[in-house]
Image: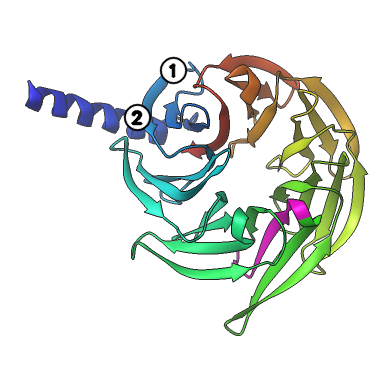
Amino acid sequence: MKIAFCLTAAAAAFTIVAAAAQSGGGRLLVLNKEDATFVIVNPDSGAVLAKVGVGQGPHELVASTDGKYAFASNYGTGGAPGHTISMIDIAAQKELRRIDVAPLSRPHGLAFTQGKLYFTAEADKKIARYDPAADKIDWQFETGQNATHMVLPTRDLRTIFTSNIGSDSVSAISQSGGSWTQTVIPVGKGPEGIDLSPDGREVWSAHSRDGRVSVIDVATKKVVATIDAGTKRSNRIKLTPDGRYAIVSDDGSGDIVVLDASARTVFKRFAVGKSPEGVLIPPDGGRAFVAVNGDNAVAVVDLKTWTVTKKLQTGTGPDGMAWLR
């Protein structure tokens, strides 16, 4: 019976990965904060195909470039700061490592590029880099800014942007001649969600405490536009693959606010549910997934009609998401 079970589990793992590779739909990866779980979801049927336990209070999720691994930042809960990142073998459906990043704590924002994982250590005002091949943290940089929350590298990795909620700033950390220097860019109140435009020329920063969005020119590292999005508490911002729109989740109102990127104005606003947080747009750009944390569901939004077409039940407290092609 044990041999039969192992063969069944292996077949199931192969089915998940093979189906994602062969299907244009891919697979949706979701973190559930309250459940402390990572799940693989069929985005069309809503079926949960696999579930893996991670650390307490997981917030953000990213997949490796080759689609073999997922990384979950275990932020912690209440007065118990987290200090681990879960490395998940997607095909095997198991936590491969629980990476201890101590003395760094409150790992949050994640980005995977050029074979390495970049993350924020919010409680330490730092960003750091983890090398999965060597299984070690090989670089750190202190921003000196309060609540360094999200991390966003440019495609060439010459500049890494962070949102610093407590300092009302965005950091641009640039590499030149083997050393890193920081430019602190003042923005609005409580910058949290952050995204890079598809052409790589702009960084969009959504402020959680004043309802506005700053547009930063990557080349000059200066704010070139400020948009009044009218949000109560912006949580995340994502630009559509064609660069036409920016989608902001408003945790305070339960709405999604859509900005016209070129006109720098509000294009549309519609309700998705209680406490929308994470936003994911797959590469095909036809739909967006919004983690509606308060409703324990992921809303699927049609980006042509701007309507919620369905809600997926993925677990308790969904937030961070990633896409498996």
Residue 72 among those drawn in magenta: no
Which residue in the protein does label 2 denote? 16
Coordinates of residue 311 in the picture (x, y in percent): 60, 16
The structure residue drawn at horizontal position 61% and vertical position 14%, both measured from the top left corner, is 310
Q: Is residue 177 left or right of residue 22?
A: right
- As displayed, is residue 18 above or below residue 176? above
Q: Quadrant of residue 163?
A: bottom right
- If you read the primary sequence from the N terminus, does the residue marked by circle 2 or circle 1 appear first? 2
The structure residue drawn at horizontal position 55% and vertical position 50%, both measured from the top left corner, is 106
Name the foreground residue: 33 vs 202.
Answer: 33
Which residue in the protein does label 1 denote? 47
Coordinates of residue 60 in the picture (x, y in percent): 55, 42
Q: Point out the stretch of residues depicted in magenta.
A: 154-166
Name the foreground residue: 275 vs 147.
Answer: 147
Q: Quadrant of residue 124?
A: bottom right
Q: How many marks?
A: 2
Q: Which of pointers 2 and 1 indicates the residue nearer the eye?
A: 1
- As displayed, is residue 296 above or below residue 91? above
- As displayed, is residue 186 above or below residue 241? below
Which quadrant does the N terminus fall into?
A: top left
The structure residue drawn at horizontal position 50% and vertical position 28%, both measured from the top left corner, is 25
| Residue 300 visible, this angle | no
What amino acid is found at the position of numbered circle 1 in the picture? Ala
- As displayed, is residue 2 above or below residue 110? above
C-alpha gap between disc 2 and disc 1: 12 Å
Q: Is residue 7 left or right of residue 122?
A: left
Q: Secondary structure at mark 2?
A: helix
